[in-house]
Image (tube, helix red, strand yellow):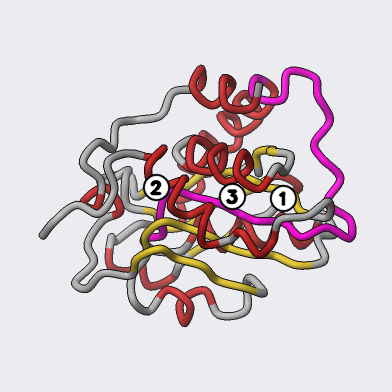
Amino acid sequence: MTAIFEDRVDAGRRLAKAVLRYRGDATIVLGLPRGGVPVARQVADLLGAPLDVVGIRKLGSPRHPEFAVGAIGEDGVRVVAPDALSSMRVSEAELAQVEQRERAELARQMARFRAGRPRLDLAGKTAIVVDDGVATGATATAACRAVRQLGAEQIVLAVPVAPPDWVDTLAQEADVYVAVATPHPFWAVGEWYVRFGQTTDDEVIACLD
């Protein structure tokens, strides 16, 4: 198995070329914190588009936090993957504890990222929703639903890497799907990067500034 991208900056530059056709005044790029924001920064720069974050937190399995069994977003958005809950044997009580913790972290994170700035108005816009990859699809689903609630006219879900069946998994969440690579077999997003370290809050803030 060979890595496809050097790091998130490399992935973002390559992804940006795949969405060049959406360059225009009506386009806004939205990164999923934290790891999606450095990717989105590259996309926004090449398209000359404004960049914002979409407030999303993964609901990780209590015993395997990196494995998403769902996701939450701003304005009450909540997505749960029943198959993932079952396979990871996560009870409703455990999920509720995870969600309570992640709601608090989401509020803290977005207050810090936006630093008093209002979120960008998506009404009538083309929103390019960017993450560093798709695995279970829970966070991508939550992000698209949140963006839809905020009035985006068109949603483009764009990622560097995703499983071959990602469009089927995400069903009707976006209007357009763009992936640089869809390798098979697919186990985890980080496998396809040479460097895939944790993105910090400070790195996200630097991208947004």
**Exactly how many numbered labels are in the figure?**
3
What is the span of residues highlighted in magenta in the rendered image? 112-134
Q: Main secondary structure of the magenta part?
A: loop
For label 1, the residue is 76
For label 2, the residue is 11
Label 1 Cα crowd, 10 Å radius (few <14 / some 14-19 / many 20+): few
**Which kind of residue does numbered mark 1 sit on?**
Gly
- Give the numbered dot on residue 99: none
For label 3, the residue is 72
| Residue at the image point whose x is 66% and y is 44% from the top | 54
**Which kind of residue does numbered mark 2 sit on?**
Ala
CA distance for labels 2 and 3:
25 Å
| Residue at the image point whose x is 76% and y is 53% from the top | 27
Between 207 and 69, the one lying in front of the other is: 207
Magenta span has 129? yes
Of marks 2 and 3, which one's residue comes earlier in the chain?
2
**Which kind of residue does numbered mark 3 sit on?**
Ile
Indicate the position of residue 19 as horizontal and vertical percent values: 58, 61
Circle 1 SS class: helix
Indicate the position of residue 190 as horizontal and vertical percent values: 26, 47
Q: Is residue 51 visible?
A: yes
Indicate the position of residue 81 as horizontal and vertical percent values: 46, 67
Q: Residue furthest left?
A: 1
Screen quadrant of the C terminus: top right
Q: Is residue 201 above or below residue 134?
A: above
Q: Is residue 190 above or below residue 142?
A: above
Q: Nearer the viewer, mark 2 or mark 1?
A: 2
Of marks 2 and 1, which one's residue comes earlier in the chain?
2
Magenta span has 169? no
Q: Nearer the viewer, mark 2 or mark 3?
A: 2
